[in-house]
Amino acid sequence: MSLLRRSAARAEGRAGGEGGFGAAEGAAGLTSRDVRSGPSSRQRKSAIFRTCANPRCASGWLHLWRSREAPVFENGWCCSAACTRACVEAALRREMDARGPVRETHRHRIPLGLAMLEQGWISGKDLRAALAAQRSAGSGKLGEWLVRQRSTSEELVTRTLGLQWGCPVLSIEYHNPEDLTPLVPRLFIDAFGALPLRVAAGKILYLGFEDRVDPALALAVERMTGLRVEAGLVPGSHFRLAHERALEARFPSAELIEAATERALAMALANAIEESEPVQARLVRVHDCFWLRLWRRPQAGPLPESGSIRDLIASTAAH
Ligand SMILES: [Zn+2]
């Protein structure tokens, strides 16, 4: 069962007024300023000089002269529905071909218990007792057993995981989920266990995870929002509480698309772009999904205005 089907099934039973959600990660290499400014006044005034973003555009100069200003897809103006589709197809190919820059790192990691022992945060006796309890129960993470047996604190377990993954431990202080819902679609928060925590100085988004960070999602959010994403871990009980609260918040609408072929997917996404006439749009891939975001108005700040964005989260049966 695909992520979209699983998530759609879960979303059906949930209130909140969302049409759907999706997941994808992307790399359009755009900046948030591109979205904020929209087409420049020079561009608006001189549509006659505009160049279609489709390198294979077959339109004659008379076609390019017309006053159509939108849509804009990844900073490029598309002169016709056919050119929008060609640009979307090229972006889909780019996202499917890109194996990196995020690669799953299979670094050798010292097991959690040994890492904690090395730090002097637990004793050998603590470790043996937790391993025995875990073995006889046949379930549970070692860190949970160590905390349950009062051998260590949840904070130290998270700190050790942070050392293992080379990422910081983040706090949920000042976390206001309602403020952050336009940044990451709820599907990703739900399916990938991510938690947007706060935006600092209008430039950095702190993104929390429970056990391990998801670099593919972090990169996708960075590319989509134009914010630098600092991913880190949040102690388990704090994470679960804040994550639950985040999922209850009201998110911008999102639509799920599941297409039979890549061609059908490109057509569905291009149609959505034509219909919404966005001043900016971007496509990124997140794991097995594509995330298309449409900005229908230029943005005033780093946090998108909920009512002005439209998210489509899509996958293909073949992908
Ligand atoms: Zn064109």
Image (cartoon, rainbow, N blue to C red):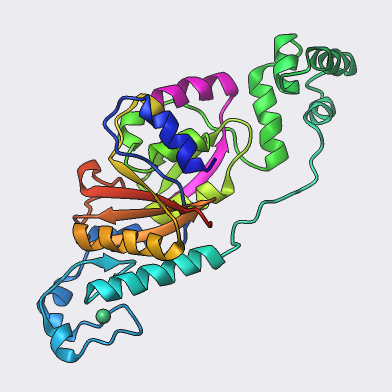
Quadrant position of residue 141: top right
Quadrant position of residue 102: bottom right
Residue 38, image x, y percentages:
22, 64
Question: Against 8, is 276 above or below?
Answer: below
Q: Which residues are magenta?
A: 226-246
View extreme (top): residue: 149
Q: Is residue 234 magenta?
A: yes
- Asked whether residue 176 is in view, the answer is no
Quarter, ligand 1? bottom left
Of residues 316 and 142, the one nearer the viewer is 316
Q: Is residue 67 left or right of residue 288?
A: left
Question: Against 310, is 163 above or below?
Answer: above
Q: Is residue 3 left or right of residue 313?
A: right
Of residues 202 and 296, the one nearer the viewer is 296
Residue 133, image x, y percentages:
81, 12
Of residues 38 and 198, the one nearer the viewer is 38
Residue 243, image x, y percentages:
46, 26
